[in-house]
């Protein structure tokens, strides 16, 4: 029996009532939370458990990064310089740079290179108390390399103590060999690779990039139809650079999330609320591309669309491996409150991944916790470039 009783904890449980528990205790047993509440109410039976006094430190759920492209080859520092000299992300993409340049580098890397390249990025997230991370494919755009990316993502979960959720993002860009033939790419590569990867157990969800430089809603719908047949949940990069209708499409398919959503409008927010679709906000990409249109936070609040925040870690539009900085940017760039930004990387991020056993501190949830050297939850969003993590607890060894 693996047991631990955390005492003298300042708990931010992220449950429905979400009131802080100032002098609390959390009982952990075999990988799950057995009890949480004020120390004064701790049942007698826990008195004999091994205890750790955490001296009034703040305890939150372990953080969840629900949108990353963590596995890739090469880097795009050159494009960073091009943008500083005035080129736009779209121009670079249309000139053959952008996502497809990372495709070339990713195809050239073998499985082990993809894994070892991603590990330092993963370690940076783990060091900030992240316990669950989503990783997308989408820099292979052929069967072999899409498989390599998904296998690398699964392997990362063996090499580190972290839960990995994969998303198949075959509909990320049109590879050079299919230039001008996006529909053929969807039929011949994207859909057939999705089916094969699903058969191998490599796919937890299906994603797409609905944008002028990528795929139309009609093309994305073809991929979503296959996801539906396979019983896989869907999500979508929607309304990042323009309004194409991706969010409505995502809502129509009951998507877990619509991501970026800078150009979404109130009607989109209403549709997301009705379908239970989470708005995943990615301020790292907004910042990197110096976008000016922020997502419609007011409409999301008004219609009670849950908002999550994620790093979008990728070599092009968001070379970022800090979820704490993402929380800060969510507040400063998008106007979230610090309380919203904490919910956005815990309970709402869990929901964006379809997970019901993490992201909150409550009986029966997995023992996935972050203990911080701070006094209040707001401090997690307030600092820039400082990591106050004291201890991360993930799993059943305490
Ligand atoms: N949106 C993004 O933020 C990433 N992919 C996407 O569809 C960017 C990917 C890249 O530029 O490499
Ligand atoms: Fe992305």
Image (cartoon, helix red, strand yellow):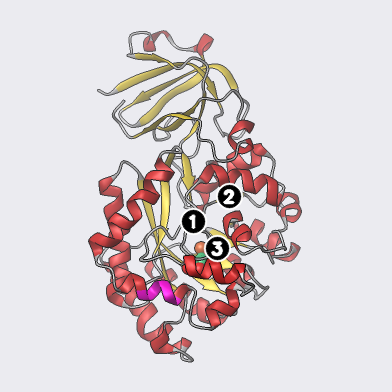
Dots 1, 2 in contact, CB < 8 A: yes
What residue sits 61% from the left and 67% below the top?
84
Looking at the image, residue 311 lies above or below residue 216: above
Residue that carries the numbered disc 2 in the rendered image: 308
Quarter of the picture containing the C terminus is top left
What residue sits 64% from the left and 63% below the top?
261
Residue 85 coordinates in the image, percent (x, y)? 62, 71
Report helix, strand or loop for mark 2: strand
Residue that carries the numbered disc 1 in the rendered image: 67
Quarter holding residue 270: bottom right
Instruction: Name the outermost residue toward the bottom.
Output: 180
Residue 65 coordinates in the image, percent (x, y)? 48, 49
Dots 1, 3 in contact, CB < 8 A: no
The magenta-colored residue range is: 100-104
Quarter of the picture containing the N terminus is top left
Q: Is residue 264 left or right of residue 77?
A: right
What residue sits 63% from the left and 48% below the top?
329
Quarter holding residue 285: bottom right
Residue 254 coordinates in the image, percent (x, y)? 55, 63
Majority SS type along the magenta span? helix
């Amino acid at each position: 029996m693996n047991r631990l009783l955390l005492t003298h904890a300042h708990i931010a449980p992220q449950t429905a009532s979400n009131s802080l528990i100032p002098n609390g205790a959390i009982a952990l047993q075999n990988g799950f939370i057995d009890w949480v509440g004020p120390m004064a109410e701790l049942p007698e039976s826990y008195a004999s458990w091994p205890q750790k006094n955490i001296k009034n430190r703040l305890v939150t759920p372990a953080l969840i990064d629900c949108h990353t492209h963590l596995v890739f080859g090469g880097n795009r520092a050159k494009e960073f310089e091009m943008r500083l000299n005035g080129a736009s992300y779209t121009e670079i993409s249309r000139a053959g740079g952008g996502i497809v340049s990372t495709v070339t580098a990713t195809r050239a890397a073998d499985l082990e290179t993809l894994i070892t390249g991603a590990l330092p990025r993963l370690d940076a997230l783990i060091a900030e108390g992240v316990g669950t991370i989503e990783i997308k494919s989408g820099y292979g755009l052929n069967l072999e390399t899409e498989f390599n990316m998904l296998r690398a993502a699964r392997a990362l979960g063996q090499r580190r103590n972290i839960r990995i959720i994969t998303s198949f993002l075959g509909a990320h860009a049109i590879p050079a060999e299919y230039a001008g033939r996006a529909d053929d790419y969807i039929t011949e590569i994207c859909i057939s690779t999705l089916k094969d990867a699903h058969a191998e157990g490599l796919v937890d969800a299906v994603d797409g990039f609905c944008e002028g430089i990528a795929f139309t809603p009609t093309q994305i719908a073809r991929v979503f139809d296959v996801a539906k047949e396979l019983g896989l949940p869907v999500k979508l990069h929607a309304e990042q650079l323009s309004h194409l209708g991706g969010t409505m499409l995502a809502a129509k398919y009951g998507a877990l999330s619509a991501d970026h959503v800078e150009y979404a409008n109130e009607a989109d927010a209403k549709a997301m609320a009705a379908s239970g679709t989470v708005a995943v906000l990615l301020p790292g990409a907004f910042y990197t591309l110096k976008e000016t249109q922020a997502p419609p936070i007011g409409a999301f609040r008004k219609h009670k669309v849950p908002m999550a925040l994620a790093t979008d870690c990728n070599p092009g539009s968001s070379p970022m491996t800090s979820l704490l900085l993402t929380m800060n940017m969510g507040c400063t760039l998008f106007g979230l409150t610090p309380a919203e930004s904490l919910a956005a990387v815990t309970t709402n991020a869990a929901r964006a991944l379809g997970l019901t056993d993490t992201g909150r501190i409550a009986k029966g949830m997995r023992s996935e916790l972050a203990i911080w050297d701070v006094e209040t939850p707001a401090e997690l969003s307030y600092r820039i470039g400082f990591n106050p993590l004291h201890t991360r607890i993930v799993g059943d060894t305490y």
